[in-house]
Image (cartoon, rainbow, N blue to C red):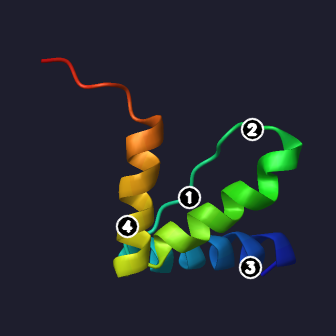
């Protein structure tokens, strides 16, 4: 088996384990200066604990589009 094949399978297995935990991989576009911030927010939200739930509510309140009546 070649190294690229083994590496591909390792990545697939890792992603499968992450999906089993409810995590998904996605790409976002942003400014380079926000990279560290966005990664930190993503890691905090991925914890799934009470603090991440509170953070989620705060972020949604700031960035969510206004609700129409």
Inter-mark Cα distance, 2 to 3 = 32 Å
In the image, residue 6 above or below residue 66: below
Inter-mark Cα distance, 3 to 1 = 20 Å
**Mark 2 lies on residue:** 30
In front here: 61 or 37? 61
Answer with mark 4 or mark 1, whichever residue precedes in sequence. 1
Answer with mark 2 or mark 3, whichever residue precedes in sequence. 3
Secondary element type, mark 4:
helix
In front here: 58 or 56? 58
How many C-alpha atoms fall within 10 Å of the one at disc 2: few (<14), some, or many (≥20)?
few
Quadrant of the image containing the C terminus: top left
How many C-alpha atoms fall within 10 Å of the one at disc 4: few (<14), some, or many (≥20)?
few
Answer with mark 3 or mark 4, whichever residue precedes in sequence. 3
Q: Between label 2 and label 3, give the one nearer the viewer.
A: 2
Secondary element type, mark 1:
loop
Secondary element type, mark 2:
loop
**Mark 1 lies on residue:** 25
**Mark 3 lies on residue:** 6
**Mark 4 lies on residue:** 54
């Amino acid at each position: 088996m070649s190294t690229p094949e083994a590496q591909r399978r390792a990545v697939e297995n890792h992603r499968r384990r992450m999906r089993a935990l409810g995590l998904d991989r996605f790409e976002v576009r942003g400014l380079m200066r926000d990279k560290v911030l966005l990664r930190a927010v993503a890691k905090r939200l991925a914890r799934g604990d009470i603090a991440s739930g509170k953070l989620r509510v705060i972020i949604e309140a700031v960035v969510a589009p206004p609700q129409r009546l």
